[in-house]
Amino acid sequence: MRSVIYLMFLCFFFTGCGKEDNLYPSKEDRDWFVITDDSDFSVDQAVYSLYKKWGIPVFYNDTIGREERGVDYDGNPIIYYRVLDLNYSINGANNTNFVEKRISLIKSEENLLAGVRFVDEMLLPKMPKVFHQTSILLLDSLYNFQYGMPVLPLLEVYQGMETLAIGNIPAIAEMGQGECEEVVNRILVYLTTNYLATKTPVKMNDFQKVSYNHEQQWTYYKVNVKPAPSYPGQTYLPSARWETYGFLDYDHSKYSKLEPNPIEEWWYWLPDVDADIEDFVLAVLTYTPEEFEIKYQEYPKVKEKYTLMREILVDQGIVE
């Protein structure tokens, strides 16, 4: 028995001392988000200049790289493609209710260059540092898709795990300065509301309580504004402008009866919390406190909510 063990030891010893196989890098530590200056294509040159300036990679294809990783059993090369998957989340596929993001790529070089300029000259200068972006993906179109259902409306922007996808770039390429600024503000509103949803600032409760009936303890959100109740005891608010109750807009998705009728005959629904937050985030990004004061000087509830929202955004480092 000892002789057998001794022979096995010798076999392992001499085998271990033999010539080792060639070692190759695994390439698994490659940083796919580094932009290099190795292309003469005008768009790639513009992307590289932006990367040097801002440190943020901009892509115009969801496949951001390829790499050969050996060969298969038949001797064919194994190609690995690095793809920005908008449906990926940290917990796996992000396709709630079987809804997934679908995209189409930009074909025109002119539109691609316009998209890079939009990001470089208009979006990033206004992007708060708290909204750290791993990358930005420029697209022709971006939309939700659900199997067996009609195609849903186009999306302007979507924040994925690895990239901020911006759709409708060909249309943006045709816009003037003012229209582009509106797009930037809508993107920033989207990012801000997503960010606030993860932080739940304490002052947000104060913000929502401005539009609130403190005596009867019910909120104004999603309440019907109309001349009179439809039945005894119905919760409603008397006809008046929405600013009276602390809102910047009404719910356009529901029935409304407004102008040219006199205000005392108006009939509409007030928005929900999410829409209200979006409206006031946009107001803070659009108006200075002085400008807002002049525009809404007759509506104290609106001014109070603007002040609270501005304080929230300052506290979170979103505005100065």
Image: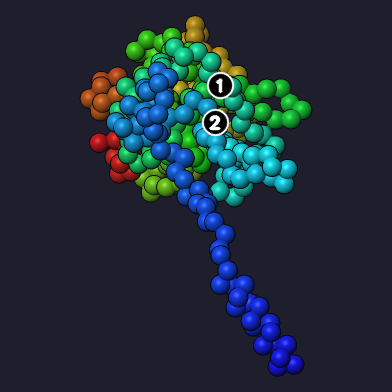
Is any atom of residue 53 visible in this view?
A: yes
Q: Nearer the viewer, residue 59 or 310?
A: 59
Looking at the picture, which amino acid does disc 2 mark?
A: Asp
* Callout 1: SS: loop
Colour logic: rainbow
The quadrant of the picture occupied by the C terminus is top left
Above or below, 101 against 167 in this view is: below
Name the spot of residue 129 as percent of width and height, x first.
Answer: 32, 39
Q: Residue at x 37, y 29 (%)?
A: 37
Name the spot of residue 103 as percent of width and height, x first.
Answer: 59, 25
Badge 1: few (under 14), some or many (20 or more) residues near its Cα, within 10 Å? some
The quarter of the picture where residue 179 lies is top left
Question: What label does residue 62 carry, if any?
Answer: 2
Left or right: residue 166 compared with residue 309? right
Left or right: residue 180 compared with residue 146? left
Looking at the picture, which amino acid does disc 1 mark?
A: Leu
* Residue position for label 1: 105
Of labels 2 and 1, earlier in sequence is: 2
Name the spot of residue 114 as percent of width and height, x first.
Answer: 41, 16
Cβ–Cβ below 8 Å for labels 2 and 1? yes
Alpha-carbon span between mark 2 and mark 1: 8 Å
Q: Residue at x 64, y 81 (%)?
A: 10
Counting every numbered tag in the picture gives 2
Left or right: residue 57 compared with residue 100? left
The quadrant of the picture occupied by the N terminus is bottom right
Q: Nearer the viewer, residue 279 or 97?
A: 97
Badge 2: few (under 14), some or many (20 or more) residues near its Cα, within 10 Å? some
Above or below, 167 against 164 in this view is: above
Residue extending farthest to the left is 290
